[in-house]
Amino acid sequence: MRVILSFLVAFGIVGSTPATASTTRTVQQWDDSIDHLVDQLRATHPEPFAKIGRLEFLRAAENLKKDLPRLTEEQRMVQAMRLVASIGDGHTQLEPDRPDFGKWYPIHVVEFPDGYFVTSAFKGHQRLAGAEVLKIAGRPVGDAAAAARSLVGMDNDFGKRWHLGSLHNAALMRGLGFAAADWSLNVSFRLANGKIVTQSLPAIAADDPRYSANFSRNDWEDGAETLGPPLGSPSDWTTAFRGEPASAFRVRDDRHPVHLTLRRALVTRNLPEANAYYIQSNIVEDSFDESFRHLFNRAMAEIDAAKSKNIILDLRNNPGGDGSRIPELVTLFGRHLSRQQNLYLLTGPKTFSAAILWLGDFITFLHPTIVGEPAGAALNSFGDAHEFPLVQIGATSHISTLRNVKSGVLDLSRFTPVDIPAPMTFADWRAGRDPAVDPILAGQEMRSFAQIALTDGADAARTAMLERETVFRKHSWWTPPPEIELRRAVQLLTEEGRYEDAIAIGEINTKFHPDIWNSWYNLGQAQLQAGRLVEGQENLRKVLEVDPDNFNKNELADIFARDPAKRFTVPPILQWGSAPVTIEAVAKRDCATSRTRRIDPPFLASVKREQVQIDCDGFDYQGGPRHLELVFRDGQLVMAWLMLNPGDKSSVLEWAKRDLGETAVERGQYTVFPMHLAAWRNDKSELLFYSPALATEAEGWFAEKAS
């Protein structure tokens, strides 16, 4: 398969195939090849016209055929490549495969968020390493980049960032009208010292020993940014990182920043000082010295031995490979990692193909925190390209054969999700900084919203989200956590009996995703299990508002028929953490009379400033007016006493067992429902409700009474 082969060549794992011999191409040969190409696209690609209209594409093909007589050979290739690229699929491409297109410019230009920069320069042009590219052929570099990118199919704008290979090819730049008649390219740079210079770059025949002579494909772009087009050997290239040669990154060097330890296929690095373990996978394939399977089994054993808390899996430079290896990885990681460990998965514009399958499966089964930038294609995208030679014109086409679905068939997103945006600028790269890895190693909060909620609770998650919404909204591609991830957090919290946290995260989910019925159903179910029947019924009704024909409607009808007066219910007025002024407003509605008073001295041992109580008379609970006392510790509602009658105990305990699914525990004067933070006080016929914030202190009361 071409995709895997090209990656192996780019990383020096196997040699390349020889390019097609150069011959004179006639108009008829081009005409026949275009017809054959269109036929292959329509017969092979699962949805060739998903992003471009069929008639628009076919008209473009016919217009190209009409223009053939007036076009140069370079222009014909450019127009044919542009035709295929219009499909809008990063796996479906046309590229020259002939020696007369095998000349390259001696620099490697990469677009970063802060501009276009030379990450590596060929011998004789070392001063250009680290230079910013300003103009090409007298035009803004963005114009030349856009023209070069128009020759390569891309799934999204992040894929565009990566695909600049054609900008380095002399024949293609000549066909685009940027190169001179002698193939040279006039480029203006801002050097590292700030000086602006204009230089004519020569076209040099490909002679990298990893490839065939005069190699003309863009496979080299799958390799490291420390290298460049297929010219010479790594020692002939000078990088913008400390002026080191590219060969310095072909051997392991732990003195380098973590992400630059080794710019080859696979690398691991144990970082015990940060309680972390780093894995960089730049291909989904074996490396030259260790198999893919062996490396990850070794890494898991080392993680287990070191008890690493933070596992960093870096796929930012992984353009793909053999996707059949991914299911085994999911099982391996799932078997070794616990929820107490933090799994970070790093993505970026170059993350593509099998690496996206990897990302999709890890999101579905392992729920990592995603850090970096979106990948070069969406979770649902085309792939598994097959190669079709077009011998008459000296080109090769690559056409997708299937659509990978990793995010549900209805997901039309163009970007993969990112929890923590961490774009790497050229200034970062040159200085050896890594905005994705460095904060993790420094102990900064980089976990996903859902992971924070599961580990530290809803309050910590809410605080993190408020901060992130402020900071991350500047990235147009960043979105709040996906509904399904928040739903999973709510379900896990509910299963653990952390009902208040589950409800708080469920409420956040409905705020972010009000048009997804699952979010309302998820929240309502959590409230039912917490004993909050009234609120649960209210939110479950919104399921039918969003989706009137919801398949759960019979189940929901049964829930709506439940009478709160004949169920064990937590009164809706008990909104833990609320301030007195908030509850006073509710009390005016729900109580016949109410008054607020200060308790001095406080009876709660944990009070730091003051204890306040709202006395509520005539509160309707289970069919009768009751007296309710609402207790506030330092401005937050933490406890409530509901006065009942001695004869109510049997029904309360029966309803609690039926409606909460929890058997009461006898603790002296208390009959306790610890999962639901409630207790019946036997000596005074009072029903006690307390918040998670008071759980430890309340346990002390029960222990004292039990003894």
Image (cartoon, rainbow, N blue to C red):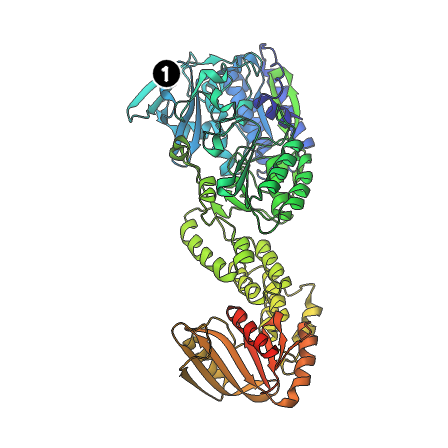
Is residue 309 shown to the viewer in this render? yes
Q: Amino acid at mark 1?
A: Ser
Percent from the top left, x then y, of residue 190?
32, 26
Nearest the viewer among 650 and 177 is: 650
Residue 515 position (above or below residue 255): below
What is the number of callouts on the image? 1
Q: Quadrant of the C terminus?
A: bottom right
Secondary element type, mark 1: strand
Seen from the viewer's position, the closer of residues 288 and 139 is: 288
The correct choice, above or below, for 631 with respect to 593 in the image is above
Which residue of the protein is positioned furthest toward the front in this rendering?
Answer: 707
- Locate residue 638 relative to residue 546 in the image: left or right: left
Q: Nearer the viewer, residue 338 or 327?
A: 338
Could you tell me residue 426's position as x and y percent?
A: 40, 33
Residue 588 appears in the picture as rendered: no
Residue 494 lies, with reference to residue 537, above or below; the image says: above
Q: Nearer the viewer, residue 332 or 112?
A: 332
Q: Position of residue 560 (x, y in %)?
A: 65, 75
Image position, residue 119 (x, y; %): 42, 26
Q: Is residue 93 above or below residue 437?
A: above
Residue under the image location 69 percent in, 65 percent down: 552
Query: Along the horizontal axis of the image, is 125 left or right of 558?
Result: left
**Disc 1 target residue:** 200
Residue at the left extreme of this rendering: 195
Q: Quadrant of residue 236?
A: top left
Q: Quadrant of the N terminus?
A: top right
Is disc 1 surrounded by few (<14), some (14 to 19) or many (20+) residues within 10 Å?
A: some
